[in-house]
Amino acid sequence: MALAFVLIQCGNMDVDGIIEELKKVKSITNIQGLFGMYDIVIKVRASDNKTLDDVISTQIRTIKKLGVTHTLLICDSDNE
């Protein structure tokens, strides 16, 4: 199992629309709005790191009006 948290920056006016788009991505298990440097944090699960990379690259980072992302890959996520 591969697990990552992705921190997302976007414009304040775009947060709700981006969250709605993120809800369509099946690998995302949690979405939270934030205050501060990042606007949204998501938890992403996949069967392996290659699939995780594909989900982040092709399904998340391609969302319109989504700004900078910062991915935190969790090591040893089998122990959750």
Image (cartoon, rainbow, N blue to C red):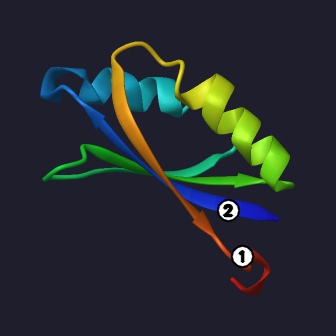
Q: Which mark is residue 77?
A: 1
Q: Earlier in the sequence, mark 2 or mark 1?
A: 2
Q: Can the viewer see residue 13?
A: yes
Above or below, 51 against 11 in this view is below
Q: Which mark is residue 37?
A: none
Alpha-carbon span between mark 2 and mark 1: 6 Å
Above or below, 54 against 80 in this view is above
Type of amino acid at the residue the image marks with label 1: Ser
Q: Residues within 10 Å of mark 2 (few under 14, many from 20)?
A: many
Q: Secondary structure at mark 1?
A: helix
Q: Position of residue 30 (x, y in %)?
A: 51, 54
Q: Secondary structure at mark 2?
A: strand
Q: Name the residue rendered at 48%, 19% in the picture.
A: 63
Above or below, 11 against 52 in this view is above
Type of amino acid at the residue the image marks with label 2: Leu
Which of the 4 quarters of the picture holds residue 57?
top right
Q: Can the viewer see residue 26?
A: no
Which of the 4 quarters of the picture holds residue 80?
bottom right
Above or below, 64 against 46 in this view is above
2 and 1 marks in contact (CB < 8 Å): yes
Q: Position of residue 23 (x, y in %)?
A: 53, 33
Q: Residue furthest bottom?
A: 79
Q: Name the residue rendered at 62%, 37% in the picture.
A: 56
Q: Position of residue 33 (x, y in %)?
A: 28, 48
Q: For the N terminus, which image quadrant?
A: bottom right
Q: Which mark is residue 3?
A: 2
Q: Position of residue 70 (x, y in %)?
A: 42, 48
**Relative to 33, 55 lies left or right:** right
Q: Name the residue rendered at 69%, 44% in the picture.
A: 27
